[in-house]
Amino acid sequence: MKIRAFVLSLSFLTSTAALPGKLLAAAPKVHTVSLGAVRRVPYTQPDATAEARSDETSSIKVRPLFVDDRQKDWTTGELHDITDRTFAIRRALHVNDALPTDSAQRWIWQPGPWITVDRVTGHITALHLPYFDPVVSNAVWFRDYVAYCGTNTTAKGGNLYVIVAQLGSRRAVVQKLIGKWPQPNHFIPVCQPAKWERQPLRVTIQPTGGEATTYNVVGTSSIIEEGDNDDSN
């Protein structure tokens, strides 16, 4: 009886001691992030004239964004690798353009704001870039910086800015007023794609039809935060 009781006690202690190890050894969930095949879809600028709206030849290319084989969003344009695990890409919006008096829904495609995607966690983050206008802005990335011409509008009028933003920063690294907005017969995009230089860190931006200006960029080396694995996605 004593021997049997000793064996049972030893078996209980062994199984109990092994339990925390099994929990600690549980592997984190691995996520798979991918972009699907490219589709060409009709696109009309929101502020286009009636003649332009009747022209269905304009189009943009869109791709679905998948996390673990589930479609999470639509995207447009090329992605930018910020780090070896995080990339930025623009959303593509499928907007209902029907008027209240229309008898049926009318769906149109529009290029949208930027998002970042973490390849490890599968987490998608919407970026609120200062004064970014999806219609007129042509954003160019370098590291975790992005440069573009942005706009703000108020009841009393608006302004056009050169903007350089850095992910994780609360304020724009560069914010330079370059004109009033809206402008009559403005170009789309309102500025040419920015040109980056590594050393010294600076960027050149040229308003379409205007003169190019170079801006020194003073920021930190990198302040993007990449979190731990999140199995909630």
Image (cartoon, grey):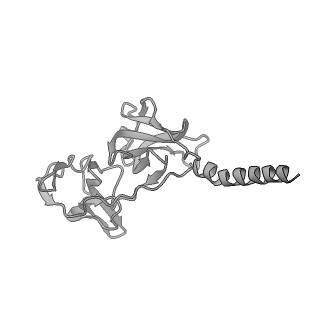
Q: Residue at x 35, y 45 (%)?
A: 84
Q: Is residue 216 left or right of residue 226?
A: left
Q: Nearer the viewer, residue 152 or 205?
A: 205
Q: Residue at x 12, y 56 (%)?
A: 200
Location of residue 38 with respect to 77 vertically, above or below? above
Q: Nearer the viewer, residue 72 or 182?
A: 72
In percent of width and height, residue 192 lies at 20, 47
In percent of width and height, residue 140 lies at 26, 48
Q: Residue at x 29, y 54 (%)?
A: 144
In percent of width and height, residue 187 lies at 24, 47
Residue farthest along the right direction in this orientation? 1
Q: Nearer the viewer, residue 154 or 72?
A: 72
Residue farthest along the bottom direction in this orientation? 156
Q: Residue at x 72, y 54 (%)?
A: 13
Q: Quadrant of residue 157?
A: bottom left
Q: How many marks on residues?
A: 0
In percent of width and height, residue 32 lies at 49, 38
Q: Is residue 227 left or right of residue 51?
A: right
Q: Is residue 222 left or right of residue 23?
A: left
Q: Quadrant of residue 133?
A: bottom left
